[in-house]
Amino acid sequence: MMASPDFNRYMPGPFDRAESDAMFNQIQEHLALHGFGLWALELPGEASFIGSVGLTIPRVKMPFSPCVEIGWRIHPRHWNRGYATEAAEASVHHGFNELELDEVVSFTVSENLSSRRVMEKIGMTRDPEGDFEHPGLKEGHPLRPHVLYRMKSPET
């Protein structure tokens, strides 16, 4: 799947084959260890893989850890069709109803308005006091400033 120039503007960069394989292995290990993780998204009859969405425990310790994050990454060819929102809603439902989580968080670079809209559409609320510099990126990196969104379980 060829990435458009916009595909990685909010991420540190595209994965080469070795990095992609390592990420796949990390996803599999997370699923085995925690019983939840990222799901592969497909469009039956159209595309076998358009991205991923799901719940994860961040590999890097965040200022608000421990936490469970909801995240997504969709190929730009499939943006603005509601797939991220639909899959994120399913992930939140799974997290609160099957996993009995008390809260999920999500975060992104400040300028990533598309992901922020998805967060708001699924009912997340921005926590401006929780905004942070992503500890997985070097100081001064242009993608380091992040905004934090939260959602509490309706049961809490």
Image (cartoon, rainbow, N blue to C red):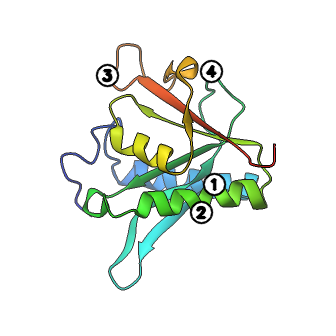
Amino acid found under the numbered disc labelled 4: Pro
Q: CA distance from mark 1 to mark 4?
A: 22 Å
| Mark 1 nearby-residue class (10 Å; few <14, some 14–19, many ≥20) | many
Give the side of residue 122 with respect to residue 34, left or right: left
**Res 37 seen here:** no
**What is the quadrant of residue 116 in the picture?**
top left
Residue mark closest to the camera, 1 vs 4? 1
The label shown at residue 63 is: 4
Percent across and percent down for residue 135 are 52, 22
**What is the quadrant of residue 6 in the picture?**
top left
Give the side of residue 14 with respect to residue 52, left or right: left
SS assignment at label 3 = loop
Rendered residue at 33%/37% (across/down): 10
Rendered residue at 32%/80% (across/down): 46
| Mark 3 nearby-residue class (10 Å; few <14, some 14–19, many ≥20) | few
Q: CA distance from mark 2 to mark 4?
A: 26 Å
Give the side of residue 57 with respect to residue 21, left or right: right
Which residue is disc 3 drawn over? Answer: 142
The label shown at residue 90 is: 2
SS assignment at label 1 = helix
Dots 1 and 2: beta carbons under 8 Å?
Answer: yes
Which residue is disc 1 drawn over? Answer: 92
Amino acid found under the numbered disc labelled 1: Val
